[in-house]
């Protein structure tokens, strides 16, 4: 079984066993006198007609509270004996104090480095021995503790999860390990064109003061300044039952689950964040891109240029959410989208081009992106601008219907796994969306019109007002990019874009 | 008329059996090792033209995974045409006799479907996921490219996808830090005439040389129904479905049998050391051996060796290199299993101020220790429990890469038994500590390995360049569409 990143596990081969069984099967068919008539050719002049799409019946979302007020959402899924539990906490890099950028992310990483009666190694051993997975991640707004476990191991796994979420010990020596690992990660980003482009793009759009302008992992300075006390203070302030939601998906019922959850989480006290005096996590305003400009970050000898084009988008709770989803699907959200068709299928400049609105509580970025062959970087930028302009004009009914169906009819697939389903429920919790959100998704997507698409394209996209980031070989790409006259071109080194390499002190 | 012979009907009810057993296990507090067998019930049919058809019903979600494996991979390629099997995979999406260029994807998306494919050394797979009402559309599209690809083929289509694939190579290898390492390893582990010597992605030169005529020849040689298997899993009625399969695939001529590859021996008979420069901050070591093929004796034990060495914080190499000594940023180990041969690799990256020599010394100490004494019972059980859990995860999705349809095809191709789940898991459950030690002793010998050090380039402005060795295959990856 393969496990290395990028390697694909389903392998097989010309095993003699296979050949033999296929031959035996074929001979058996012949000997039995079956399967000898030539088949009639079917009519291929048109693709077969489709019947009506199947109904999508999501099981009901059950909601209840534990005795301490912790809200629980449960969706029963009995296909495979697995259970997924997410503790979704309203805590993220958005509240990282100035000078301590990276605090929320570090706190998340430190939860399983010592908790309850166990140290880091004992926690890892206990979880691995159960065959369970426990992970923690922190983004801009939300920290999620995730447990994925076979049903047969739910009880002991849940106990460990509760220790990690509620009783982390934040040992000083583990903090030092994490600090060095994270500083080294920041160092390694210099090798990765995609990481360089992502960091530069966020900073260009939001600036380095805005929480969306700094990666959640933080800065070298921030990482250097975090102390164990910072971590325990942060945890005490944020990890409270009134500031969290517990999401359960899997082969359990409310009746059997609630005593387990009560035992694990019911004694968790502390009330809500407001009671602790934590300020609400508002997103500060950011200045929209008002004039197109290009930042070229030099990566000498690069075989491809990483391109990011975008501007500040719109919060998740916009009334235009479904229209934007459909519009972006046409622009760059599926294989047949305009960007991918143009840059990949027509021109062969890239292995793939796409666009996305990164929806968050505050206005996240819109971006269009591709990695393109170095020699055609300028030509690729021209095609990007052509598509960003073209989407402001009419889209066809055919495109519209394809995009709507792609989103709406493919939607049930999002609920195949316990982890995927729990992730979807997390969106309801984070944005406080009503329980019928998913039941109404299909009709809302199908209600989007050509006029809606055109309106939101014009409202949220403006090819004259975008930031363009190119990470590539300056020697080859600079002159052709300047010749496009897209706006001012600023050339930076990787060090200028990412700051000086972090100093990693070796113990 | 029923022209299909149903050979075998699996009757185990997976979800029920496993669930009841799990409930029992929970009640009694016993390990999942005592759970009921993991089975994926299916029916097996062979069409007159030799097409193997595997059907599995799972109505949990109103969706269907249609999955086709052609039993051809980069290992079947001719010299001078490396990368062709994968280039051909791309061309399969560009339309066929009754599907105009671009419409394969457009019709699928308009029905709420999705599609992709991938190529490795041994096989090429294609999947289409559709809402259950669009099953027949998926069968029409798959059968049309199996039967009528060449009717719509043109040199321009080959050129278009050639450029895309070259950009895939740039994105996945040339422009990725350490990206050239696996290309180099394959070339140095296998002799030039072995089919795993060259990478599935191919060389730029060979990709440039691929022609329209090559497409015609390759299609005729490898893409007949008798060299393929079709698995359909999801919200289907098996009886209706086999009728639709017969309708759309029955007319396609069988094609000539494809003889199995007869590879030359691959032996690494000495320790071979290589150094590669790359534009990276930190040096990384790759220590690799040739190991038994997928499902051959020793294959599963080497998976557990990898877990004991580098799976989790308590694994031996992670604990020493990353946790205790803190001289490495990461360490991983893996048995990369393929049909003809596998590779086992230990990969570790040095922290600033530390050298690969320091890292290698520790790796060697831990290999020696595991050679001298077997792992503990707990180390082996911990690994096996993780495999047991992973088999449950593999039952969740019907389509896509690694969905149940893809797995039925994978097991059929590798073992002849599509529902080999339980037998596969049994390989791990049967292991005891002495088996782990024995596998390491037999297959991970110091004088039969390739050690590749990727080091930061001495001059800033140079592209990745090798000091010794030559650029060659990705033996472990599969190239997606």
Image (cartoon, coloured by chain):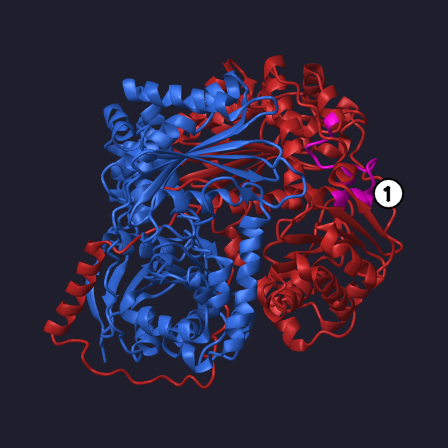
Chain colours: A red, B blue
Q: Nearer the viewer, residue B455 or B399?
A: B455
Q: Vertical placement of B41 versus B162: above or below?
A: above
Q: Position of residue A158 (x, y in %)?
A: 48, 27
Q: Quadrant of the C terminus of chain A?
A: top right
Towards the viewer: B217 or B235: B217
Local packing at callout 1 (Cα closer than 10 Å; few below 14, some 14-19, many 20+) is few
The N terminus of chain A lies in quadrant: top left
Residue A493: quarter of image: top right
On screen, residue B224 versus residue A358, left or right, reads left
Q: Nearer the viewer, residue B318 or A130?
A: B318
Q: Position of residue B397 (x, y in %)?
A: 43, 52
Question: Residue pushed farthest front?
Answer: B467
**SS at mark 1?**
loop
Give the residue at x 71% y 27%: A502
Count the marks. Answer: 1
Give how far across and how far down residue B183 sits, in percent. 46, 47
Q: Is residue B419 magenta?
A: no
| Residue occupying the point 67% across, 68% down | A447
Q: Is residue B146 visible?
A: yes
In screen coordinates, is A247 left or right of B410? right
Q: Residue at x 68, y 20 (%)?
A: A231
**Vertical placement of residue B83 versus B183, above or below:** below
Give how far across and how far down residue A66 sits, in percent. 58, 29
Q: Is residue A80 visible?
A: no
Magenta highlight range: A200-220
Q: Is residue B261 left or right of residue A125?
A: left
Q: Which residue does the numbered mark 1 point to in the structure image?
A: A285
User: Chain for mark 1?
Assistant: A
């Amino acid at each position: 079984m393969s496990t290395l990143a990028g390697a694909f596990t389903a392998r097989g081969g010309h095993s003699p066993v296979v050949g033999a069984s296929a031959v035996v099967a074929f001979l058996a068919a012949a000997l039995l006198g079956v399967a000898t008539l030539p088949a009639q050719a079917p009519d291929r002049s048109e693709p077969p007609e489709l019947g009506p799409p199947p109904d999508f019946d999501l099981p009901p979302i059950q909601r209840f509270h534990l005795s301490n007020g912790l809200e629980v959402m449960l969706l029963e899924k009995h296909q495979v004996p697995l259970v997924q539990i997410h503790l979704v906490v309203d805590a993220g890099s958005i509240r990282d104090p100035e000078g301590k950028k990276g605090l929320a992310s570090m706190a998340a990483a430190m939860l399983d480095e010592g908790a309850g009666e166990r140290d880091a190694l004992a926690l890892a051993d206990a979880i691995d021995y159960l065959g369970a997975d426990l992970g923690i991640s922190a983004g801009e707004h939300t920290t999620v503790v995730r447990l994925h476990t076979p049903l047969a191991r739910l009880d002991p796994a849940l106990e460990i999860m509760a220790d990690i979420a509620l009783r982390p010990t934040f040992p000083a020596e583990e903090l030092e390990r994490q600090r060095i690992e994270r500083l080294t990660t920041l160092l390694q980003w210099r090798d990765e064109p995609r990481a360089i482009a992502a960091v530069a793009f966020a900073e260009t759009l939001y600036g380095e003061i805005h929480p969306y302008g700094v990666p959640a992992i933080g800065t070298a300075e921030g990482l250097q300044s975090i102390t164990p006390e910072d971590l325990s203070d942060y945890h005490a302030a944020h990890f409270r039952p009134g500031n969290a939601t517990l999401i359960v998906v899997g082969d359990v019922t409310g009746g059997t689950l609630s005593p387990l959850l009560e035992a694990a989480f019911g004694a968790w006290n502390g009330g809500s964040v407001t009671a602790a005096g934590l300020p609400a996590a508002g997103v500060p305003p950011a200045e929209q891109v008002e004039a197109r400009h290009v930042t070229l970050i030099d990566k000498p000898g690069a075989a491809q240029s990483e391109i990011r084009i975008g501007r500040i988008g719109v919060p998740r709770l916009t009334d235009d959410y479904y229209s934007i989803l459909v519009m972006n699907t046409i622009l760059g959200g599926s294989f047949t989208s305009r960007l991918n068709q143009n840059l990949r299928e027509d021109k062969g400049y890239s292995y793939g081009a796409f666009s996305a609105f990164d929806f968050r509580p505050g206005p996240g970025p819109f971006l269009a992106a591709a990695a393109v062959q170095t020699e055609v970087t300028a030509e690729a930028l021209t095609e990007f601008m052509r598509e960003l302009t073209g989407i402001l004009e009419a889209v066809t009914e055919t495109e519209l219907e394809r995009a709507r169906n792609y989103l709406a009819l493919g939607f049930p697939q999002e609920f195949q796994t316990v982890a995927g389903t729990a992730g979807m429920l997390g969106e309801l919790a984070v944005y406080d969306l009503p329980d019928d959100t998913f039941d109404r998704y299909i009709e809302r997507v199908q209600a989007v019109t050509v006029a809606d698409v055109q309106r939101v394209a014009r409202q949220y996209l403006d090819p004259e007002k975008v930031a363009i980031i190119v990470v590539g070989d300056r020697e080859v790409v600079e002159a052709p990019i300047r010749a496009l006259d897209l706006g001012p071109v600023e050339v930076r080194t990787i060090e200028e874009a990412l700051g000086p390499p972090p100093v990693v002190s070796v113990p | 008329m029923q022209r299909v012979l149903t050979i075998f009907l699996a009757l185990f009810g997976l979800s029920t059996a496993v669930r009841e057993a799990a409930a029992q296990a929970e009640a009694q507090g016993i390990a999942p090792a005592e759970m009921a067998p993991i089975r994926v019930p299916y029916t097996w049919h062979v069409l007159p033209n030799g097409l193997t058809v595997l059907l599995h019903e799972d109505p949990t979600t109103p969706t269907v995974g249609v999955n086709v494996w052609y039993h051809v991979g980069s290992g079947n390629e001719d010299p001078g045409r490396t990368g062709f099997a994968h280039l051909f995979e791309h061309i399969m999406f560009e339309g066929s006799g009754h599907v105009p260029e671009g419409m394969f994807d457009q019709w699928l998306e308009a029905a709420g479907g999705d599609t992709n494919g991938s190529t490795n050394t041994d096989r090429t797979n294609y999947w289409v996921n559709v809402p259950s009402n669009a099953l027949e559309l998926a069968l029409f599209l798959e059968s049309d490219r199996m039967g009528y690809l060449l009717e719509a083929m043109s040199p321009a289509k080959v050129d278009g996808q050639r450029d895309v694939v070259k950009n895939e190579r740039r994105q996945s290898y040339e422009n990725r830090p350490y990206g050239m390492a696996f290309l180099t390893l394959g070339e140095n582990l296998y002799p030039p005439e072995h089919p795993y010597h060259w990478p599935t992605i191919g060389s730029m030169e060979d990709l440039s040389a691929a022609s329209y005529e090559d497409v015609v020849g390759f299609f005729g040689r490898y893409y007949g129904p008798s060299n393929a298997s079709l698995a359909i899993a999801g919200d289907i009625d098996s009886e209706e479905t086999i009728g639709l399969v017969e309708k759309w695939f029955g007319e396609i001529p069988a094609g000539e049998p494809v003889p199995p590859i007869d590879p030359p021996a691959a032996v690494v008979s000495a320790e071979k050391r290589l150094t590669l420069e790359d534009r990276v901050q930190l040096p990384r070591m790759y220590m690799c051996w040739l190991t038994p093929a997928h499902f051959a004796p020793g294959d599963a034990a080497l998976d557990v060796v990898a877990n004991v060495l580098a799976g989790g914080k308590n694994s031996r190499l992670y604990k020493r290199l990353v946790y205790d000594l803190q001289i490495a940023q990461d360490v991983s180990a893996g048995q990369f299993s393929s049909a003809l041969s596998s590779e086992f690799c230990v990969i570790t990256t040095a922290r600033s101020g530390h050298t690969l020599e320091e890292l290698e010394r520790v790796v060697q100490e831990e290999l020696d220790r595991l050679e001298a004494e077997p792992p503990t019972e707990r180390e082996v059980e911990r690994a096996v429990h993780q495999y047991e859990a992973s088999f449950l995860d593999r039952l969740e999705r019907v389509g896509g890469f690694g969905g149940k349809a893809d797995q039925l095809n994978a097991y059929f191709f590798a073992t002849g038994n599509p529902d080999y789940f339980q037998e596969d898991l049994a390989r791990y459950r049967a292991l005891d500590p002495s088996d782990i030690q024995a596998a390491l002793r037999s297959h991970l010998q110091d004088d039969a390995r390739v050690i590749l050090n990727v080091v930061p380039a001495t001059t800033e402005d140079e592209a990745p360049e090798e000091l010794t060795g030559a650029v060659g295959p990705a033996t472990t990856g599969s190239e997606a569409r």
